[in-house]
Image (spheres, helix red, strand yellow):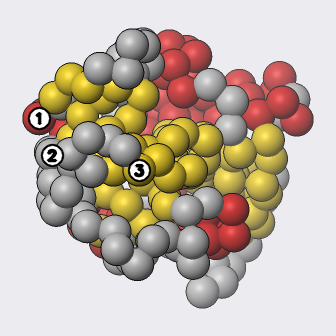
Amino acid sequence: MVVAGLRLAVTPTEELTEEQFAELDALCAAAFGHPFAEIWERVGPGVHVIGSVGGRAVAHAMIVDRPLYLGHEADQALDAGYVENVATLPGEQGKGYGGAVMREVNRLLDEDYALGALATNDNGFYERFHWETWHGATWERNADGERVRTDDKDWHVMILRTRRTPSTLDIGGAIAVDWRPGGSW
């Protein structure tokens, strides 16, 4: 679906200019209602999908490389594209910009990863784009590889199957992600 007037750009973090990064920071801060400096630091570099209208960024999402570990023993690792900082400027919401950005994110995930993943409080938004809510227990793996339960993320983690997703994937099983400061999921 093409959204009139919207231009999409896919840009790695290291290729963003200071002005572009400042604009994305302001966009995310406006959409989430709080400063974003610590969140960018926690998330790290990735690939940004930026939706612009008239040269102004109106929607954003980014993909970060993160392994996900499946199964009760977390013995199956998949290379996942973890989606972060999905945001649309408050005055521009409802115009299809966020959806266009997510369709591009889905395309990139399908090309490059065994699985897409994200954590959200708005499962319904992502379900429209074929994301599935993870039904099993969520965990984080600390630096020693020990798993710690993250039950506050149960039913908030979603996945997107790609052409490389194993056909045996069980969304009712356990899933784990590596710990990172400020929140693993």
Q: In the drawing, what numbered circle is on residue 137?
A: 2
Identify the element where label 1 is drawn.
Answer: helix
- Give the amino acid at mark 2: Ala
Front in this rendered view, residue 135 or 56: 135
Instruction: Say few, some or many: other residues with alpha carbon within 10 Å of mark 2 (under 14 / 14 to 19 / 20 or more).
Output: many
Front in this rendered view, residue 25 or 53: 25
Instruction: Say few, some or many: other residues with alpha carbon within 10 Å of mark 1 (under 14 / 14 to 19 / 20 or more).
Output: few
Q: Earlier in the sequence, mark 3 or mark 1?
A: 3
- Give the amino acid at mark 3: Gln
Q: In the drawing, what numbered circle is on residue 76?
A: 3
Residue 74 at x, y percent in the picture: 32, 41
Q: In the drawing, what numbered circle is on residue 151?
A: 1
Identify the element where label 3 is drawn.
Answer: strand
- Give the amino acid at mark 1: Asp
Marks 3 and 1 sit apart, C-alpha to C-alpha, by 20 Å
Quadrant location of the C terminus in the rendered image: top left
Residue 121 at x, y percent in the picture: 23, 47
Quadrant location of the N terminus in the rendered image: bottom right
Left of 134 or right of it: where is 7? Answer: right
Identify the element where label 2 is drawn.
Answer: loop
Q: Residue at x 47, y 33 (%)?
A: 30
Q: Earlier in the sequence, mark 2 or mark 1?
A: 2
Left of 12 or right of it: where is 38? Answer: left
The image quarter containing residue 154 is top left
Can residue 154 be seen here? The reply is yes
Can residue 34 be seen here? The reply is no
Marks 3 and 2 sit apart, C-alpha to C-alpha, by 15 Å
Q: Residue at x 61, y 60 (%)?
A: 113
The label nearer to you, 3 versus 1, is 3
Instruction: Say few, some or many: other residues with alpha carbon within 10 Å of mark 3 (under 14 / 14 to 19 / 20 or more).
Output: few
Query: Is there CB contact under 8 Å for labels 2 and 1?
Result: yes
